Image (cartoon, rainbow, N blue to C red):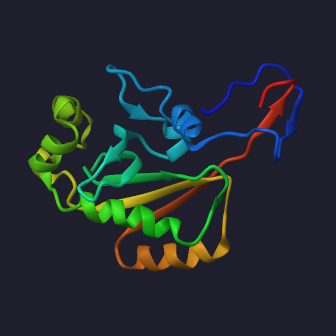
Amino acid sequence: MLFEIKGDNLEKCTTTWKHKELEIERLIVSRISDENPILDEDIFGEELFYIDRQIVNSDKKRSDIIAIDKDGNLVVIELKKDEGRLGVEMQALQYLSNMSQLKGEEFIKTYCSKKEDDIIQFLNDGIEIKDVNQRGRIVLIARFFDKALFSMGKWLSDQGVSFKCISYETIKFGENN
């Protein structure tokens, strides 16, 4: 969960929280520890194994967050502090394309070698390290999304690249956003 509510004095906050993408990252990965490297199911609708944030790929580009789902699929999570506009999906797709070149053990050694045992325990029964990163998908998180982005997302999904948009809303509680 991204927030804790104590009391009943809530109001929608549209512009007062001047946040940065790194602040959103910290909220999403705040539950991460060595003992619990799982991203919050309440946010993503499923458990995702947290790999790392701000990973520099071979093209010298930084992806916001990468994770693996229970089937070993790579999940590239791209954050935008305000609007997710047409073009952000291409940014995430570029990260996914670059990282998808490495499969199984090679992917693990490159991006998450310290977590291999934890990954094995996280994966569904029958899924092995060799199965990791055979497919990938994109999750975009923003306050709101340009409607044109959805047609591109549908097309990507039709081509076999799963695509999900998660919007968030800031809430003001007393003096806190």
Number of marks present in the image shown: 0
For image coordinates 56% across by 79% down, the residue present is: 151
Q: Can residue 61 be seen in this snapshot?
A: yes
Asked whether, in this view, residue 17 is left or right of residue 46, the answer is right
Q: Decide which of 55, 109 is in the foreground and name it.
A: 55
**Is residue 126 shown left or right of residue 92?**
left
Residue 27 appears in which quarter of the rendering?
top right
Name the residue at the front extreme.
60
Against 96, residue 47 (above or below) is above
Residue 164 located left or right of residue 177: left
Where residue 127 appears, as percent x and y from the top left, is 17, 48
Task: Identify the image quadrant of residue 160.
Answer: bottom left
Q: Check the image and report above or below for 9 versus 166.
A: above
- Would you place residue 175 above or below residue 28 in this image? above
Image point 44% across, 64% down: which residue? 91
Residue at the (66%, 69%) spot, across then down: 146
Image spot of residue 30 (x, y percent): 50, 27
Q: Quadrant of the N terminus?
A: top right
Can the viewer see residue 68 in this picture? no
Q: Quadrant of the C terminus?
A: top right
- Image spot of residue 133 (x, y percent): 22, 55
